[in-house]
Amino acid sequence: MSVLRPFRASDMFKFNNVNLDIWTETYNIGFYLHYLSRWPDLCCVQEAPSGRMMGYVIGKAEGQGLEWHGHVTAITVAPEYRRLSLARKMMGLLELVSEQIYQGFFVDLYVRCNNQIAIDMYEGLGYSVYRRVKEYYGSLGIGKGGRDEEDAFDMRKPLSRDTAKRSIRANGRDMIVTAHDVS
Amino acid sequence: MSSALDRQIRPIYDALDTGSNKSAIVACNKVLKKHPKNNLVKALKALALVRSQKVEESLVLCDEVLLSKPTDDPTLNAMLHVLRGLGRHNDMVTMFEEAYKQQPGNEDLGVQAFFANVRAGHWKSAQQIATKMHKQFQEDRYLYWNVISAVLQANDPTTPPNMRQLLYKLAHRLLAAASSSPLGNTDRFYLHLTILKELSLLDDAAALLDTEVGQLICAANLSCNELRRDIMHLRGLSKEEGERAEGLITGKGDRNWLEFVSLLDGTFSHLQGSNENAKEECAKHIVHTQEVLDKIVENDGKKDRSGLLALVELETRARKHDLSTDTDRLINLMQQYFETFGDKSCCFEDLKPYTLLQGDERESWSSFLENVASDVSSVNNLQRVINSYKLLRYSLEPSEITLEAEEDRAVLYMQQYFKALPLGNALPTTELQPADDLAILAGAVTVNMWKVSGDQQYLCRAAIILEYALSQSKQSFQMRLMLVRIYRLLGAPSLALEHYRSMRIKQIQNDTLSHFLFSRTSAFSLGSTGDLTLSTECIEASQVYLTNSQETSDFVIRAFTAEKYSQIPEFIAFEDRLDNSLQRDMTKMEHLRMRIAHEVISSDIIDMELIELKFIFDRQHHDNRDFDILPNYQPHSIDSLNKQTLLFDKADGKGWLWTFLKMYIRIFMMASDLDDTIEEKLLVGDRPKLSPDPEKQRPLKERLADRKDEELEELTPEEYALVQYADALAEWLEPFHDYARPPPAVVLAEAAKLTEQKTGLPLKGVEIPPHNGNSNGHKKDEDTPPLTEPPEMVLKFFDAMKLRFNEVKTSGDFSQILHTATIIQEAFLLLATVSLRFKSTSVVKIHKLGGLVAKLKPIRSDASSVLKDISTELAAISASETTAENRAAIAAVKLGCSEIDDDFATQITKKLTDSRKNVLEGVGKGAGRLCGTYAQ
């Protein structure tokens, strides 16, 4: 039970309980304003009835031709509100908007290859690995988690416009590209 | 441009891009030798100069280029950056408007002129340009720019209220001229709705919303849907909205809580009719809604909390209207909720609003919670136990919050904590521990025990417990925040700083969270010994405000370009909230208080700070500080943890800042030679927009003398004494300063001389009066003001404060000791500031101020001797802090649990005492040093 509403610039004043968590980055002001000035409908907040922020998602629409799609740039839920399917609801909205407003072919997101919990969740939501991006997160070299920590899976979920289901491929985990190719 | 010249200019851009301003200047000079009239090169040189902080030289070039009214893109672009660097937005507007006037067919220049007005917040001129552009280029976008500018002007605080409606009407009229339907673009649609809503043209709004496209837009766009919801309510259609929500909830599986609220609002809207049977009608609908929700609960099970919580809310509202049919229903539902969702950590927060019950209900709810199995062998059970503890604690009445009862709770929570801790053994160090909240609860209880008993050992106990729990759960920012507060209370600022830094606070968080560190931080500053740690923190945290003023307007422009009309007012409000942030200026004030203890007080510092403080004094502040982030599990009947752990037991806010601003402005105005006319001439950038607040338009002197009770209430007794002392000091000395201050013409001439020495050019707009032979003497016609006795308040301040210090020095309250000492030091520095003018023997001689100097001297030497004593005392307290006995005494504090071993407690105690020793010693030494600097 939570309020789903648009992310507003002023939410930067109240997202501390979400952002002090170490897995959530606090970007510069320009980052949030950039997304809001272009894709405000792909940015939303989940809020408790008390007004406390529970989580948010920030996304964009990008790509040329058949690659035109919705992209999840950041999705996060405060520690005390985990295990409540909040991410599922926010992803649902992002997919709806990507489909109806932007008419994209698919929605995609990047996730660390070793983040099994997240990968399972996204698979449960209908996403599958499209390709593996080498050293996507790697600026620190190989960490404890080995290659899986610095590599990312690009996971995709087809929308109705992708009638040929081009955004699904069985051997996605073996399709390796470099970070340079995707940026 | 010739290609040869082009080739010469490229290296200038390269140098600017790489930040080598020096070589950019050299390159510019080379080209300027051959082409002395080239505007672009002049502009680029001005830019390089601004970036090298050579403002005066840059100004000269900047003015030359502006005078030539440039129209070419590269020059305009370079000038845009120059003017921005100088804070001259008004000149930017003029420059682009001139250029557009010269080339009215140039669409790009029109856009630039429009944007310049947007940046400066000149909505009226922006409208005029947009009108012109729409006429000429026939694009709907310019019409919408015009419309949103009218809306923004209506929303601007400087716009009189009676203009608001007119501007919205204007916007509405303009919209009628659009060639395309508002339904073609979500944000245009949004803007239409906003205006119709504001003008209460609700039927028109409904017509738009009811179109097929309108409905589609609202279904996929949260912002538009929000507006739609508001409009429905304004139309009094809560019933229909409730039905719509019911459809979404049951048909589409929508679980947005807003829909449930609509459903409930709809249910109770039946009460509003004048119908006699309204109550009966409503009762029927309550039954229906109950059935709907029961079904949802059945289907959703544990998947979603909405249905069940909505039932709780439904029953609560039914009770309010005397429509409840079952007295046990609320309790039953709450129990059901706890049974179903007690293993989620948000259960406490969900039920909190409903738990303040009375009589039998309270009994039965409490006994239900007390009977929750205390088994913590699984994460789910543990969460249930934690929720039951939190809920029980929240509803405690004052009679149940005795020291003994709290002790029992603290012991229980820690026992359970240690039992549950192994549940998280396998978790990586980046994860939070499931048992964390038990330690946080124990910490909160022990803090309250300190409040109840006044005994600081409980604070030490809280610190040790939380440090231990943090060692098991390294990412717990909640524990860190509590520790920051506790260490400040314990007078161990370096430990607070360490935890604060560990949270990696950055960007905008510097605005919302830095109060944890900076609130009254000057009490802990070692600036007087040359240690700039805290001052540097202040400066770094304030970076975000510069970024805001430099960058946010760019995104406003981008939102215009992308026609995201829903975002533009939000961005502007955001920029304003950050620009006029209360914390920004509270940080500034603390920085200033530390600065005068660190740097030698000179007229340069006084003048610069004075100008800045006066600007701040005209601001309308927004309080963006986040206090809710501190976990609060204290009972509803006592103060929150935030309130309990405020330093010196006083919440500082607008009143505090206002009082200190007035005090410093008054003292600095006395000590400074600047007056308004001089300031105007020397000012480089634009003045801030004048506030429409009538309060701010009163004469400065009057505003400064105004002391309001609600402001003074935010002061500690020591701060209050300081303010009274400073007021008395000003009252006494102002006539002498006014008499001895050189006339503005002389001050300006001096400034002009300095500028000329620096830049080789005279100061613009300043005419030096003919030399009359005694520029130094400027003897006045009137006589020296009659010598008066120094006020009691000034004479007695230092001795009274010494007494106060003697009272607190043995209290064991180290933050209080430091506070008293630093307030005395501040009073001494203010005295030094106002004595500065009378240090020059020639000034004293010419103005016959010998008598005054003779009266000031004993006050200063008395102050100095008090401060010296305090310096010695602090050294002694500091030395005793780290003795073995003292450490052992603190480490022996009863922890209420045996699992934290002595070594751990000893280690924390050592850190605590070391930190205290350092700050006491440093503040003491610094005070001694200041005595040496200013005693004479």
Image (cartoon, rainbow, N blue to C red):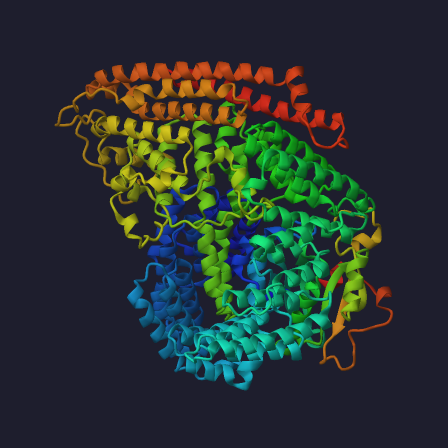
Percent x, y of residue B48: 48, 47
Q: Is residue B395 above or below residue A94?
A: above
Number of numbered discs overlaid on the protein picture: 0
Q: Quadrant of residue B611?
A: top left
Lateral position of residue A154 relative to residue B318, left or right: right
Q: Is residue B432 above or below residue B887?
A: below
Percent x, y of residue B215: 55, 81
Q: Quadrant of residue A128?
A: bottom right
Percent x, y of residue B414: 72, 38
Closer to the camera, B835 or B699? B699
Percent x, y of residue B241: 53, 77
Q: Is residue A111 above or below residue A41?
A: above
The image quadrant where one finds the C terminus of chain B is top left
Q: Is residue B204 above or below residue B878?
A: below
Residue displayed at 23% across by 37% down = B768
Residue displayed at 62% across by 57% down = B351
Lateral position of residue B30 relative to residue B338, left or right: left
Asked if residue B21 shows in the view, the reply is no
Lateral position of residue B453 relative to residue B900, left or right: left
Asked if residue A130 shows in the view, the reply is yes
Residue displayed at 59% across by 57% down = A53
Name the outermost residue toward the front: B360
Name the outermost residue toward the bottom: B212
Closer to the camera, A157 or B486? B486
Closer to the camera, A129 or B775? A129
